[in-house]
């Protein structure tokens, strides 16, 4: 059965509560923009693409189930206000702001069309939001295809045989509408028979790796091993050759115009490790994550989250032998009174990134070490052409 973080049919939306994974698979109903805002803020749903899709679909559900005014302008104003509210839920991932921008344009156009009324504006919005859900899965499958082809063809490990990859955080079906971005690349390598092993990092403090990526890899029966974040360096140094580790592939929350990439905290240190050990460092992201209006990583707002997410751990009781799902406990793992710094993301400079894998191909730096990301928005027709674009 395919893992679904988002269950949608017109007028109804459910999200898999990711705070309860991996031990409990429970869905929460989302009836409104307010429900979505809180689900995103609390990280019951998370992942740059998934955040955008859940927000867009929650407003679609609200619109479908409400008594609608027949006046086009009034429905437009209602939608604009809800989109402005939804984008305040989490600041770093650009996908939500990008989706809101596109949906505002759709609604603006619908509201001035010939014969426009409340119903036609609502329909235009709902159709556009539903298309985002469908497009994301196909984008991820293309990211997986391009990324797997690039790794096999452009790494020393790929030329030797089956490759191993390291990945950070969760970038799979639980972070998107399905298949995933960086984890989609790993899925594609596995499907091609080109994957030796996947290594996923725990990804403290929310533990997206140990709770979510490990869950997905076990679900898909992909050969995989969990390591703590602090083990990554030793893993590469001691097992890089024997495991034929080709590189590290991660997702992204926002890729700036120069290629600097904001992603889960810990990504930057992995990029330094890759550079030091001479393995590839790859970012996998749909074009909805590329933000040409942000010049560089210095301009990206990094979300800081509550200190208790570092000092407290919540989960079902385990006595060392058996798991008791009926008892959920919260335990403190830090000294009382200690200060906590908890940035949810960091920025990896473009100089440490070997390629940015998108649904239209892999962007490499030119001979001057510069990414030309504008090409990916001109590359509509290159869906199935060679997987390297932009590199000169
Ligand atoms: C394809 S998910 C992209 C990105 O989102 C995750 O952040 P969070 O779990 O806080 O929503 C992580 O940074 C992933 O790499």
Image: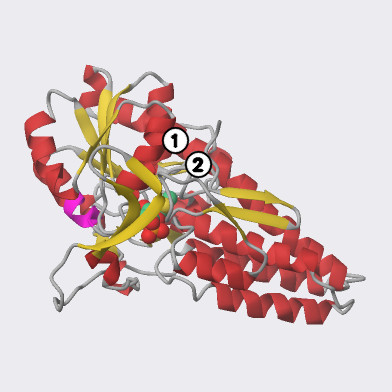
Quarter holding the N terminus? Answer: top right
User: Which residue occupies 38% across, 31% down?
Assistant: 218
Please state the horizontal and vertical placement of residue 195, each as a whole percent of the image. 32, 24
Please indicate whether residue 113 sits to the left or right of residue 50 in the image: right
Query: Which residues lie in the magenta part?
Result: 266-271
| Residue 270 lies in the magenta stretch | yes
**Any mark on residue 140, and which?**
2
User: Which residue occupies 88% across, 73% down?
Assistant: 117
Please state the horizontal and vertical placement of residue 119, each as a whole percent of the image. 86, 68
Please state the horizontal and vertical placement of residue 340, each as a whole percent of the image. 19, 73
* Residue at disc 1, CB closer than 8 Å to ligand 1: no
Quarter holding the C terminus? Answer: top left
Name the one closer to the observer, 179 or 62.
Answer: 62
The quadrant in which residue 314 appears is: bottom left
Please indicate whether residue 21 sits to the left or right of residue 196 in the image: right
Majority secondary structure of magenta residues: helix
Label 1–label 2 contact, CB within 8 A: yes
């Amino acid at each position: 059965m395919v893992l679904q973080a988002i269950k949608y049919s017109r007028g109804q939306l459910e999200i898999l509560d990711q705070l309860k994974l991996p031990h409990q698979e429970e869905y929460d109903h989302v009836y409104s923009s307010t429900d979505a805002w809180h689900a995103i803020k609390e990280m019951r749903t998370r992942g740059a693409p998934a955040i955008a899709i859940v927000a867009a679909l929650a407003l679609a559900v609200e619109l479908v189930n409400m008594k609608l005014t027949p006046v086009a302008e009034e429905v437009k104003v209602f939608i604009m206000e809800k989109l402005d509210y939804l984008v305040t839920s989490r600041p770093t991932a650009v996908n939500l702001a990008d989706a809101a921008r596109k949906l505002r344009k759709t609604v603006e156009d619908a509201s001035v069309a010939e014969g426009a009324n409340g119903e036609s504006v609502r329909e235009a919005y709902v159709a556009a939001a539903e298309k985002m859900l469908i497009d994301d899965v196909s984008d991820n499958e293309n990211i997986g295809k391009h990324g797997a082809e690039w790794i096999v063809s452009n790494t020393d490990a790929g030329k030797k045989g089956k490759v191993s990859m390291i990945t950070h955080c969760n970038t799979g079906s639980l972070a998107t509408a399905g298949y995933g971005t960086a984890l989609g690349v790993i899925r594609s390598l596995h499907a091609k028979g080109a994957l030796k092993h996947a290594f996923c990092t725990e990804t403290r403090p929310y533990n997206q790796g140990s709770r979510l990526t490990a869950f997905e890899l076990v679900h898909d029966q992909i050969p995989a091993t969990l390591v703590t974040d602090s083990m990554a360096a030793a893993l590469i140094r001691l097992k890089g050759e024997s495991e034929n580790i080709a590189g590290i592939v991660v997702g992204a929350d926002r890729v700036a115009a120069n290629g600097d990439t904001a992603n889960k905290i810990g990504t930057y240190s992995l990029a330094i490790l890759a550079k030091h050990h001479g393995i590839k460092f790859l970012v996998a992201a749909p074009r909805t994550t590329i933000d040409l209006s942000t010049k560089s990583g210095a301009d990206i707002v990094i979300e800081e989250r509550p200190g208790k997410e570092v000092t407290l751990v919540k989960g079902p009781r385990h006595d060392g032998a058996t798991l008791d799902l009926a008892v959920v406990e919260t335990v403190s793992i830090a000294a009382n009174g200690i200060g906590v710094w908890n940035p949810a993301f960091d920025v990896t400079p473009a100089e440490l990134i070997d390629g940015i894998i998108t649904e239209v191909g892999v962007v490499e730096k030119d001979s001057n070490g510069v990414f030309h990301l504008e090409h990916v928005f001109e590359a509509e027709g290159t869906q199935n052409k060679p997987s390297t674009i932009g590199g000169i």
